[in-house]
Image: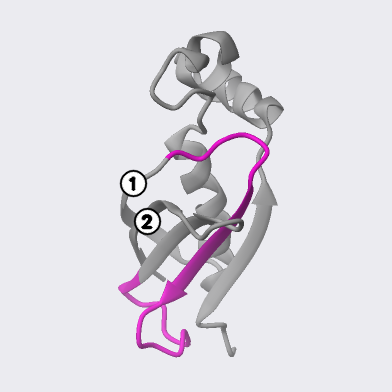
Amino acid sequence: MNLPSTVRLERRLTQADFDRFARLSGDANPIHIDPRFAAETRFGRTVAHGLLLVSVLRGLIEQLAPGARLDSHEVVFPAPTFADELMSFSAGFDGNDGNDAHGKEIRLEVARVADGTVTCQGTARIRP
């Protein structure tokens, strides 16, 4: 099977997505779900849950290496992801054609389409 070396997805996460993820995960931190609270923070508005972003990236990992098991991931959030911004999600193999997913490291990134600001970046390790 010939697998892609990088997969990308553009998605606009909404406040309703943040609210649903909060209910599902139990993470009801007001920075994610309370616009009035968030307006008083350094961000000025609600921000996405980090694990919501990672969950979307996990879907891309499955496209990149179908059936592979996620061993670990490590990500940082250098900037916030706000509701209703068009975001680019990507997952890819560095210097690899993507044909062998055994013990491979995948680079992960989320960036704003409007200005390229990276809001989440890191790596995941997979195995068959």
Q: Is residue 107 visible?
A: yes
Query: Where is residue 122, by image quadrant?
Result: bottom left
Q: Residue under label 2, please give it.
A: 121
Q: Residue under label 1, please give it.
A: 78
Q: Nearer the viewer, residue 83 or 75?
A: 83
Q: Which mark is residue 103?
A: none
Left or right of 17, for residue 110: left
Say what secondary structure mark 1 lies in: loop
| Segment tinted magenta in the rendering | 80-105
Q: CA distance from mark 1 to mark 2?
A: 8 Å
Q: Is residue 97 above or below residue 70?
A: below
Residue 80 position in % (x across, y down): 44, 38
Amino acid under disc 2: Gln
Amino acid under disc 1: Pro
Query: Where is residue 109, by image quadrant?
Result: bottom left
Q: Is residue 28 visible?
A: no
Pick out the residue farthest to the top: 36
Q: Nearer the viewer, residue 58 or 128?
A: 58
